[in-house]
Image: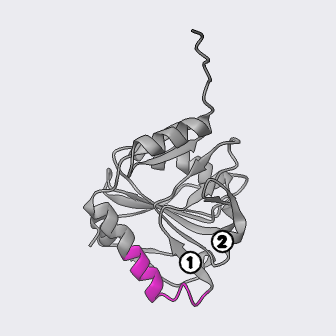
Amino acid sequence: MAVVQHELTMSEAADLLSSALPGHRVEILQGRLTVTPPPDGSHALALTWLVVAFDRAGARKAGLRYVQGVGLWLPTLPQDFAIPDFAVVDEDFRDAHVRKNCYAPNVFRLVVEVTSSNWSDDLGPKVECYAQAGIPVYVIVDRKHDEVLLYQDPVDGKYAKPQHYKRGQSVPVPEVVGVALELSVDTLLDGD
């Protein structure tokens, strides 16, 4: 009996992993499959707090939406996509659907990643990918190093060095996002 073998595309492999690992986040960054475990309690509470903070700041009234786990199509390689923990997007972002529940980068105003066990992806490839995608503001809640990093205003597909914020400080949300808000570093790191 003959066996027909089929080499999977990166996208097909990502789909298989997503099915096999419920609750895990599967992404393709710079042509490399990455898998992130489900969030822990502090991670989840930080994201919930962000929803409340952006709601209280009037994001919806400003024509924005805040979403968790919505795909961002990346221009780095043909199959690249990320699934940010939290994002602020234009209210009509659904009109910018690309494929695989991913949306075009031009509708994203701010992306937040809260680090997990694979923290190096958030601090490395995602910085490069989000800059190349032209994401105006990228915030990394770096629980590994107990600080928050703020990248903004990419030029020629690169962010300048980040601003570092330590415990006891607040991160000012840049004007380009569309709402006036300061984010507590302690709450971002600890959740609540």
Q: Where residue 148 sits in the image (x, y, percent)?
A: 40, 62
- Checking the image for residue 65, the label placed there is 1
To which quarter of the image does residue 110 belong? bottom right
Residue at the (57%, 58%) spot, across then down: 71
Residue at the (67%, 61%) spot, across then down: 105
Label 1 crowd bin: few (<14), some (14–19), many (20+), radius 10 Å: many
Q: Please check the rendered image and state whether residue 153 is part of the magenta-colored stretch, yes or no.
A: no
Residue at the (73%, 53%) spot, across then down: 156
Q: Amino acid at mark 2?
A: Phe
Query: Could you tell me which secondary element the residue under label 1 belongs to?
Result: strand
Residue at the (66%, 71%) spot, across then down: 93
* Closer-to-camera residue (114/41): 41
Q: Where residue 91 sits in the image (x, y, percent)?
A: 63, 79
Disc 1 to disc 2: CB gap under 8 Å: yes
Image position of 125 with respect to 59: above or below: above
For the magenta stretch, what is the residue range? Answer: 49-62
Can see residue 170? no
Label 2 crowd bin: few (<14), some (14–19), many (20+), radius 10 Å: some
* Closer-to-camera residue (146/50): 50
Q: Quadrant of the N terminus?
A: top right
Image position of 156 with respect to 15: above or below: below
Name the residue at the front extreme.
1
* Closer-to-camera residue (139/50): 50
Q: Earlier in the sequence, mark 1 or mark 2?
A: 1
Q: Amino acid at mark 1?
A: Arg
Q: Quadrant of the C terminus?
A: bottom left
Indicate left or right for 146 with 88 as reference.
left
Q: Where residue 114 sits in the image (x, y, percent)?
A: 40, 58
Q: Please check the rendered image and state whether residue 59 is part of the magenta-colored stretch, yes or no.
A: yes
- Checking the image for residue 93, the label placed there is 2
Q: Where residue 184 sits in the image (x, y, percent)?
A: 35, 74
